Image (tube, helix red, strand yellow):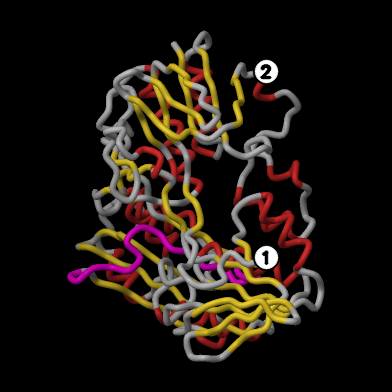
């Protein structure tokens, strides 16, 4: 049996390992389009501040690991998939045959459609190549403009501050991390960053970027220019599925998959940031571009590649945990609530502490927090388990911090 996995990120590597465990005799080829060994993009901020070297970003650090696992690593870019012939085509013109195919090509940064986005000194922070360019320019005292204050932007932010740059963050939305925090928590996070010496401009867009005598000039849509030695864009990502045009594989935001992470084409599966998989909370299908979902997808897809329809995907819980200059923020499940949901809020602006719980009937369905690190695992467990809280719903409505007591009371029957 020949398995081909396209994409050398967490989903692809996890899938290859699971395939080897489940079928010791199968052939496995893992195709990546970067020259480095498979690595974690989430480790790049640690590389930027010299906490690790490039080898520290590698997903598996043992010498000859993939060789020992009998996983063939191929470098190349897949440009076409032919489901009828069970083949893929690479840019070099090579055609490879598969019995089962997993597409785990991940996502790529969205490039703003503005003049100057391709100028030297304007980078994303997505690859090791990007990291090398950023290290070269983000020296102590340099002026850096970061476009985007979402999840990825905030991860990059801390590394830039540690490098001693003068940092300005530009965010089009009215708050920081708008897909993770509501206006109260996002506003508090902005104040926190400003207290650390960062200039944060919300409700502000970028009209263009120009070369200047001192480096770069970022033109804001309010007409104000910002001087910069380096511009980093972090304005979201998009699934890498364009190469599937004409293949017959159904795509929306990502590749549409069923409960077994199989596409509409026989023997073709998808996992990770390119898969539009089931959301645990809503029951709908969406792209969840987070590493825990990628790993879960890879494991489940591999099981179904070996024995089709053997493991159902119950859905991934939407969750984010972010450390921004020492202030921890989280979101789980349906953190924004719904029209008919009940909610409880705890706010201490002076201490940058915020906790919001969302309920449907007597079940906890979502939560977001800022500055709260106690019982985060319990919080996630209550949402994931969908346990009936009973009397503990009202107790949490009155005091949202009683999470551990609610867990013991509702799950273990303790009053």
Residue 158 placement (x, y as % from top left): 67, 68
On the image, the x and y values in percent for residue 297 come to 42, 37
Where 403 sits versus 246, above or below? Answer: below
Magenta part of the protein: which range?
323-340
Which is nearer the eye, 238 or 385? 238
Does dot 1 land on a helix, a strand or a loop?
loop
**Which labelled disc corresponds to residue 186?**
none
Element carrying mark 2? helix
Q: Label 2 belongs to which residue? A: 68
Q: Quadrant of the N terminus?
A: top left
Residue 344 at x, y percent in the picture: 33, 75
* Front-lying residue, 351 or 71: 71
* Numbered circle sitting on residue 120: 1
Q: Is residue 119 above or below residue 258?
A: below
Question: Nearer the observer, disc 1 or disc 2?
Answer: 1
**In terms of depth relative to the viewer, which is nearer, 340 or 126?**
126
Identity of the residue furthest to the top in this view: 25
Q: Residue at x 33, y 27 (%)?
A: 311
Foreground pick, 65 / 269: 269
Image position of 161 (left or right of 220)? right
Return the disc, 1 or 2, that comes first in the chain's sequence. 2
Q: Position of residue 132 (x, y in %)?
A: 74, 55
Name above or below for residue 219 compared with residue 368: below
Residue at left 19%, top 71%?
339
Q: Residue at x 55, y 29 (%)?
A: 92
């Amino acid at each position: 049996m020949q398995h081909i996995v396209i994409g050398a990120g967490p989903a692809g590597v996890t899938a290859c390992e699971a395939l080897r465990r489940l079928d010791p005799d199968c052939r496995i080829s893992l195709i990546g389009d970067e020259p480095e060994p498979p690595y974690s993009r989430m480790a790049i901020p640690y590389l930027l501040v010299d906490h690790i070297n490039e080898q520290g970003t590698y997903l598996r650090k043992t010498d000859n690991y993939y060789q020992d696992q009998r996983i063939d690593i191929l470098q190349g870019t897949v440009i076409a998939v032919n489901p009828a012939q069970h083949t893929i085509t690479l840019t070099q013109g090579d055609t490879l045959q598969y019995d089962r195919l997993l597409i785990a090509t991940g996502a790529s940064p969205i490039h703003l459609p503005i003049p100057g986005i391709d100028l030297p000194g304007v980078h994303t922070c997505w690859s090791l190549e990007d990291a090398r360019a950023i290290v070269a320019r983000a020296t102590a005292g340099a002026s850096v403009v970061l476009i985007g204050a979402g999840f990825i932007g905030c991860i990059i932010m801390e590394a830039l501050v540690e490098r001693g740059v003068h940092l300005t963050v530009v965010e089009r939305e009215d708050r920081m991390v708008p897909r993770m925090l509501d206006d109260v928590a996002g506003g508090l996070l902005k104040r926190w960053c400003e207290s650390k010496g960062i200039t944060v401009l919300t409700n502000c867009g970028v009209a263009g970027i120009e070369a200047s005598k001192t480096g770069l000039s970022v033109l804001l849509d309010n007409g104000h220019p910002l001087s910069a030695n380096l511009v980093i864009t972090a304005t979201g990502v998009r699934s890498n599925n364009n190469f599937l045009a004409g293949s017959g594989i159904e795509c929306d935001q990502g590749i549409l998959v069923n409960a077994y992470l199989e596409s509409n084409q026989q023997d073709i599966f998808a996992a990770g940031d390119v898969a539009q998989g089931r959301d645990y909370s809503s029951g709908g299908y969406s792209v969840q571009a987070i590493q825990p979902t990628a790993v879960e997808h890879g494991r489940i897809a591999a099981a179904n590649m070996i024995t089709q329809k053997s493991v159902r995907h119950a859905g991934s819980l939407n969750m984010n945990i972010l450390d921004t200059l020492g202030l921890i923020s989280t979101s789980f499940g349906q953190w924004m609530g719904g029209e008919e949901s009940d909610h409880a809020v705890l706010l201490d602006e002076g201490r940058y502490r915020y906790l919001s719980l969302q309920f449907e009937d007597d079940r906890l369905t979502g939560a977001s927090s800022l500055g709260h690190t106690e019982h985060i695992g319990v919080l996630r467990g209550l949402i994931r388990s969908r346990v009936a809280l009973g009397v503990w719903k009202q107790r949490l409505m009155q005091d949202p911090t009683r999470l551990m007591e609610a867990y013991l009371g509702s799950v273990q029957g303790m009053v």
